[in-house]
Image (cartoon, helix red, strand yellow):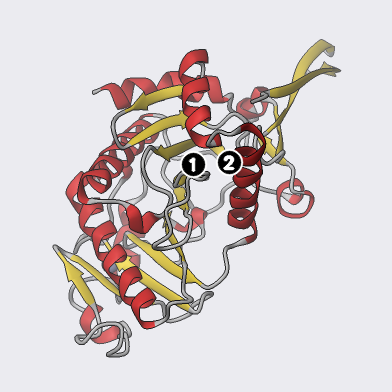
């Protein structure tokens, strides 16, 4: 396993006195996929014209609550229902979580799952139980979909929190998908992991955990269920990976593994909150339902997104959208150091 990096220096004369300043530009390559990113930590110091505010304004919460279809007053009247082959009652409920079909799907099987009745939850307000209920309810829906269509094989658990992450609704919720074909990224991870296994005789993900633990620059924590590591070559700010020890699909996860995953997410969100984060994306990269793969381990990534406010500086531009080159402002090693504290409690 190789962690390839190339450091270049760039010199400029910076105002106000135009003295020479040298900045480091670090190019990194993902050890499995070869996906590249470029890191300049000085970019985090940019005086962004849209300045971050400390908290989401209560005005925004109040305004978006009016007519929110995920709030308890409307959810049962305003959201759609599954057909009876998926669920006899049309929606799956567990605790305060409700799972129902996405009204505007981008997959043949695409659901939405709320966490609870609260219209807004800040990052430090999610507790493990809400996440557990949400994940188990999504799993129940995934199994129901798979039972009704055996070709629906690739589950995705996806969580966009607050509008800068792509979420159109403030009320906390996740999306669950089951596709007949994997996404391009998922397909690449599966095929590269298989190649790795065939040429080296080892599961890449198990080796990654061992190697990262040994180096201990990006390793954050580990238990029987999963390891938490800051990604070597991130595709998002403050990117953290969750890698499972004994599962290759999201639907393989048992109650204990889901409980450990939820606890780890809760702690990462608390760590993000301390770093001033107010929006994030989390997504799983899952093998197929019902097929345990020895060359692949279920993994998930979480990244921070710009703070929710009226006008903000987006964290992705043309390089990310059109060149597939990820410009990053934070060193993974610094993210790991800050996050270790939150995960150790
Ligand atoms: Zn709401």
The answer to whether residue 315 of the structure is visible from this angle is: no
Left or right, residue 184 beside residue 301: right
Mark 2 residue's CB less than 8 Å from ligand 1: no
Residue hosting label 2: 236
**Disc 1, ligand 1: is the CB inside 8 Å?**
no
Which class describes the residues within 10 Å of circle 1: few (<14), some (14-19), or many (20+)? Answer: many
Image quadrant in which you'd find residue 80: bottom left
Q: Report whether 331 appears left or right of 160.
A: right
Query: Residue sitting at 61 percent across and 46 percent down?
Result: 194
Q: Which residue is drawn at 62% across and 54% down?
A: 185
Point out the tag, 1 or 2, that comes first from the N-terminus.
Answer: 2
Asked whether the residues under the numbered discs 1 and 2 touch, taking CB atoms below 8 Å apart as contact, a structural biologist would say: yes
Q: Nearer the viewer, residue 339 or 313?
A: 339
Q: Quadrant of the C terminus?
A: top left
Residue 307 location (% of width, % of height): 48, 44
Whole-percent x, y for residue 272 in the image: 39, 35
Instruction: Name the secondary structure under disc 1.
Output: strand
Residue drawn at point x = 64 percent, y = 38 percent: 196
Q: In this rendering, is residue 300 above or below 331?
A: below
Asked if residue 155 can be seen in this view, the reply is yes
Which residue matches tag 1? 304
């Amino acid at each position: 396993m190789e962690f390839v990096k190339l450091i270049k220096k760039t010199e400029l004369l910076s105002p106000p006195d135009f003295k020479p300043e040298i900045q480091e530009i670090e190019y990194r390559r993902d050890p499995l996929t070869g996906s590249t990113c470029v890191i300049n930590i000085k970019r985090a110091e940019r005086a962004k014209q849209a300045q971050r505010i400390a908290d989401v304004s209560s005005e925004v919460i109040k305004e978006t609550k009016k007519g929110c279809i995920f709030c308890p007053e409307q959810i049962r009247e305003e959201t759609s229902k599954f057909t009876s082959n998926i669920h006899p009652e049309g929606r799956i409920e567990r605790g305060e979580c409700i799972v129902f079909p996405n009204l505007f799907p981008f997959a043949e099987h695409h659901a939405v799952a709320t966490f609870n009745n609260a219209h807004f939850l800040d990052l430090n307000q999610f507790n493990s139980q809400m996440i557990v209920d949400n994940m188990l309810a999504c799993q129940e829906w995934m199994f129901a979909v798979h039972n009704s269509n055996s070709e629906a094989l690739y589950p995705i658990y996806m969580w966009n929190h607050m509008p800068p992450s792509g979420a159109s609704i403030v009320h906390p919720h996740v999306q669950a998908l089951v596709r007949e074909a994997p996404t391009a990224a998922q397909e690449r991870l599966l095929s590269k992991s298989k190649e790795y296994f065939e040429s080296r005789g080892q599961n890449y993900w198990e080796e990654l955990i061992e190697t990262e633990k040994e180096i201990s620059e990006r390793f954050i924590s580990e238990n029987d269920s999963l390891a938490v590591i800051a990604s070597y070559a991130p595709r998002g700010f403050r990117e953290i990976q969750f890698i499972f020890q004994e599962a290759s699909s999201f639907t393989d996860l048992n109650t204990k593994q889901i409980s450990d995953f939820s606890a780890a997410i809760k702690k990462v969100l608390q760590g993000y909150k301390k770093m001033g984060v107010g929006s994030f994306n989390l997504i799983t990269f899952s093998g197929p339902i019902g097929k345990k793969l020895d060359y692949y381990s279920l993994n998930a990534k979480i990244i921070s997104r710009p703070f929710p406010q009226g006008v903000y500086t987006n964290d992705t531009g043309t390089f990310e959208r059109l060149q597939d080159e990820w410009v990053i402002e934070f060193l993974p090693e610094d993210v790991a150091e800050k996050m270790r504290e939150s995960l150790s409690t």
